[in-house]
Image: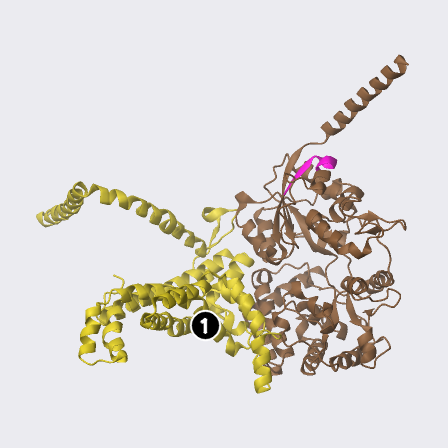
Chain colours: A brown, B yellow
Amino acid sequence: MKKIVSLLLCLAMVLSVMSFAAAEAKEEMTLNVMLPDFYSDSDWVTLENGNPVLQAIYEATGVKLNITWVPNSGYGEMTSLTLADPTNMPEVMVIQGPRDAITISSARAGAFWDLTDLIPQYEYLAQGQESTYNNTAIDGRLYGIYRARAYARAGIYYRNDYAAQAGITSVPTNVAEFKDLCFALAGLDNMYCINMCKYVAGTIGYTTVMFGAPYQYGVNAEGKIYPAFEDEKFQEGLDFLRELYAAGGIDPNFMTIESGNWDDAERSNPPKALMRLDCLDNGYRYEEWLEANAGVDPANPVVTLLTALPNDEGKIQIWPQNTGASGEIVVTKAVSEEKLPAVLKFLNWCNSAEGQTLLNCGIQDVTYWIHSDGYRYTYPEGEQENSSKYDTYTKTVHHSLNQLGMNVNGDLTPPTAQTLLRKQYNQNLLDNAKYVISNPCLTFDSETNTLMGTTLATDVEDAQVQYIAGKIDLAGLKAAYEDWYSMGGDMIIEEFQAEYDAQK
Amino acid sequence: MSSKSAVKADSLSREKVGYWKKLGIDLAKNPWLYIMLIPGIIYFIVFKYLPMWGIIIGFENYSPFLGPFKSEWKGLYWFQRFFATRKWWDYTSNTLILSVMSIVFTFPAPIILALLLNEIRNIHYKKVTQTLLYVPHFISIVIVVSITYVIFGADGIIYKLTQSVFGTTIDYLGDPKVFRWMIVGQNIWKETGWGTIIFLAALTNVDTQLYEAAMIDGANRAQRLWHITLPAIRSTVVLMLVLRMGSVLDTGYEHLILMSNSLNRSVSQTLDVFVYQNGIVNGQYSYTTAVGLMKSLVSVIMVITSNKIAHALGEEGLY
């Protein structure tokens, strides 16, 4: 008996020494991170306050995350302010616009570590798509690790119950039928058709591309680059939106609706807007919301997902909602050369199944639950009625930690249940991938575009919005296009053309 | 060396000695006054004069990672660039129109309100009114804009009211014609009450015997206001106006950014907004420093001119 006890004790000792050694192998370090925040009140998301997710990350990697949360709406401004003060940069930060002027100039000035040769050395990071990596490259060098997003998630979703009320029961199969549907929905009393907000680029982009226009820039038969707004199909799309606006199909006050309140018009009772041109995943989320809050029967979804419609010439084109990524994660020069491998090791770990699950879902039975059907839910089994209570808790604990997730090697988190619409969404993604077009000048480097591009694009977009809202006529719109050329647009085209020709 | 220049040098040095001597005597006489001056001087050097060197980046291609000394020197490049875009006049005229409107409409408002308050005889009623009038000043402009959105937006009371009364309605938040009036209106609502403080203080200095004398002479209320009260606060009004001229081009970018959208951007884009959007958001520090510097030059010219006008009117002005 004594022997057994002593043997067990020995074993325990060996084990504890081993576990101690294992813990020792993990280098302890504090990492200052700046992330966009989609919720308010992030005070609890610190290690000092005992946040369980951060604690779990620390236990798994030895990294103490010290996170600066920046409200998402002001993240772009905070990024440039942060980069204006090289002595006070966070060590790792999210860059939302990898090709923004401020990102490019900072990268050139040496604000970020060049990761081109380092990425292939890390197991998970190396599994990323080369083309997506290249979309974020500056002067052919990689300064960040992209945050993967479904490439072709743009689409249309609408309320089929109200469409039936307006006399349209069949799902549109081409652009002409889609237009009929829009005008029918616009005819319903006290309801708008397309739900639009301050962020108009999506609606205008999706519509014009669906009508057959190129995305941002096109290349004509002679190999000349031209801005998309010069395309007659683009004008067709704008004219359609203008007509729909005039027919009462768009809320006249859409320009005062912040993107954070975009859902409001759909989620009021009865809904104020019946259709949206946006990310399709918002479509199934809308349906799930209706099922939870408006008593909609999951067997008969009232939201229809619509995508890949052929235009009048039978051509199918999908607007690239993103470039396969939503920004990137950079390592700034606040990290010393000695510390860099450890930081990259951590970022690599973020892509492992363990890391992805912690960042995206949190901890099992605390912020997510696996039900008996084997799928992941945001509430414990049998607690569906109280799901909002768990949502609130999850938001407080987990917050926007998923913003640190890159998932370049694909989604390794526990799967969620496949509702009817989610299944269709996955199918749509596959279909869409065949038709998504891209901006031919995305990776081109034009000095004028870096300097003036954003300002010029805003001016043109403003004019397009005014045209849709009937505030200016075609002559006014053309005048704004002329301004675009004279204020630097001609230089942008020239510089893009030079690169395009050089590429051939 | 000629004797002439020697005399000149001698007189110069004597002048210099005279100045320092004078200062020395004064120092000995009032040492504490000069000691009390030191924090003020330090404040101006540290927070006003040293940062002024920052304008140097307006003449460079500034990069925060290279610093102001290593960045590439560009001379007047950014100024040329700004004037080469046809928009520069739009931004400048938007700034000027909004400034002139705010001077014309928001500047007299607190004076009128102060005069009205001054006529209230019930002291308790007056105190309560005054306190209530100060409240909007303490409300953040973000909240003011939110309230405006709620009231004037598509579901707002005013919007619905004009719609039901007149059949049609104005797009209060999008129409470029209405935009400036909305800004002026918000400023009047927010700052008028607070602005009365200085004028009410000036009004308390008016000798009440003058009113009594005027009453005996048969002057009515309006005549007393015109001939006694207004002349009494005239110098305060002029001083406030001259002070105001210095910041007349500061249109308050945060207010404008909150109120601007694609429909009204043609009038909401002022120099300040331009500087903010291109400098802070897009990180073009040099370009926007140059634009900001140009704006400051115009401001200086306006202060000097308005001061001259004040002198011409027989008032003291700023200096």
| Relative image position of residue B315 (x, y in whole percent) | 23, 68
Q: Residue furthest left?
A: B3
| Residue holding disc 1 | B184
Point out the image quarter for the N terminus of chain A: top right
Q: Nearer the viewer, residue B60 or A464?
A: A464
> Residue A18's image quarter?
top right
> Residue B167's image quarter?
bottom right
Q: Is B58 located above or below residue A236 in the figure?
A: above
Residue appearing at x 57%, y 53% in the figure: A78
Q: Nearer the viewer, residue B276 or A13?
A: A13
Q: Do we see residue A148 in this rendering?
A: no
Q: Is residue A64 magenta?
A: yes
Residue appearing at x 61%, y 83% in the figure: A473
Does A22 sit left or right of B35 as displayed? right
Range of the magenta residues?
A: A58-66
Q: Secondary structure at mark 1?
A: helix
Q: Nearer the viewer, residue A459 or A306?
A: A306
Q: Is A414 located above or below residue B250 in the figure?
A: above
> Residue A423's image quarter?
bottom right
Q: Do we see residue A284 in this rendering?
A: yes
Q: Is residue B207 magenta?
A: no
Q: Residues within 10 Å of mark 1 (few under 14, many from 20)?
A: some
Q: Is A259 located above or below residue A129 in the figure?
A: below
Q: What amino acid is labelled 1 in the image?
A: Val
Q: Nearer the viewer, residue A11 or B81?
A: A11
| Relative image position of residue B9 (x, y in whole percent) | 14, 47
| Relative image position of residue A391 (x, y in whole percent) | 74, 53
Does A165 sit left or right of B24 as displayed? right
